[in-house]
Amino acid sequence: MILNTGNRTDIPAFYSEWFYNRIRAGFVLVRNPYYPQQVIQYRLTPEVVDCLAFCTKNPAPMLNRWSEISDFKQFWFVTITPYGRDTEPHVPDKAQVIEAFKRLSEAVGIEAVGWRYDPIFISEKYSLDFHRDSFERMASSLKSYTDHCVISFIDLYQKTRRNFRGVRAVTTVERAAIGQDFATIASQNGMILRTCCEGADLAPYGVDCSGCMTRTVLERAIGINLKVPKNRYTSREGCDCLLGSDIGVYNSCGHGCRYCYANHDDQTVKHNMANHDPQSPFLIGNAMAGDMIKAAKQVSYVDGQLSFL
């Protein structure tokens, strides 16, 4: 199976001690975000977890203890964008994140760590020229430390409109300009440019529009072929990524990014983070009366063949 940690929060940045405690314990408990008393228990062993998948804006807190998960196959996304404190209030200095990215790449290999430059939005401050120049500088810094970059454009969810007033959709013309320029820059720096759930509009510019965390991407990262059941793929239209089995919790990421889809509001996030116990089997809080715990059906997807992708 593929165990995800990063679709709902940023575990490496804020909860690394808890995560390593769960690795030592060999299991984790996860509440259903819509029916909280329904709890899933996942075993955390390499025998049933074919790949640990991370998505973070700051991998640094994980790196000094990385040997504790070195027995697991891994795939990492590190998001590095050019926005300032006006948009990403609590994201560390980008130069520090780039250095942590390099250390991570040296540990897991360039196939197992991808750069995310998303979401992209356009404003007077963050213009097309600004994005082009920023992407070129970052790509040059990350050259030889990853072989691909994923982009996506801002989605205007209701909570995003509320928390990020004045933001607008990126136009078709702007998307084309970014796709064309970024694909060229990525190629010059030894990277493939991919999109995340953006359709095939940028394919004519040499952009890989097949998805960001597909079976093919993961097989290349871990060097093993996988036989994944059809129902393990995401249900999002036009997406073939493996996004299920996430152990994170919504409304628990402390970066405070104004465009975030996973946080409802700052007060809820502060409340949840205050209820974090590094010793608990739950990321936020502990056991509650009426909890119904069910062991997840975990089966390895490895088919026994090495991948030569």
Image (spheres, rainbow, N blue to C red):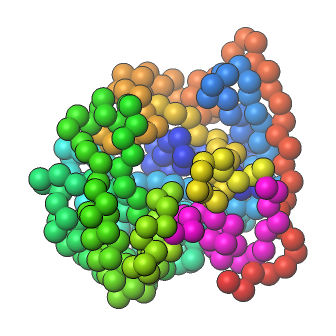
In the displayed structure image, the side of residue 70 where residue 159 appears, left or right: left
Residue 10, percent from left and from top: 48, 46
Q: How many marks?
A: 0
Q: Residue at x 25, y 75 (%)?
A: 137
Residue 128, percent from left and from top: 19, 65
Residue at the top extreme?
289
The image quarter in which residue 109 lies? bottom right
Q: Residue at x 79, y 45 (%)?
A: 43
Nearer-the-camera pick, 128 or 191: 128
Q: Is residue 70 visible?
A: no
- Give the magenta part as a residue range: 209-230
Nearer-the-camera pick, 97 or 50: 50
Q: Is residue 126 above or below residue 194?
A: above
Q: Quadrant of the N terminus?
A: bottom right
Q: Is residue 169 visible?
A: yes
Q: Is residue 42 above or below residue 274?
A: below
Q: Residue at x 76, y 75 (%)?
A: 224
Residue at the left extreme?
124
Residue 39, percent from left and from top: 74, 28
In the displayed structure image, the side of residue 181 where residue 72 appears, left or right: right
In the displayed structure image, the side of residue 220 where residue 300 appears, left or right: right
Q: Is residue 272 magenta?
A: no
Q: Is residue 212 magenta?
A: yes
Q: Quadrant of the C terminus?
A: bottom right
Q: Residue at x 35, y 71 (%)?
A: 179
In the displayed structure image, the side of residue 203 where residue 154 appears, left or right: left
Nearer-the-camera pick, 291 or 278: 291
Residue 52, percent from left and from top: 66, 58
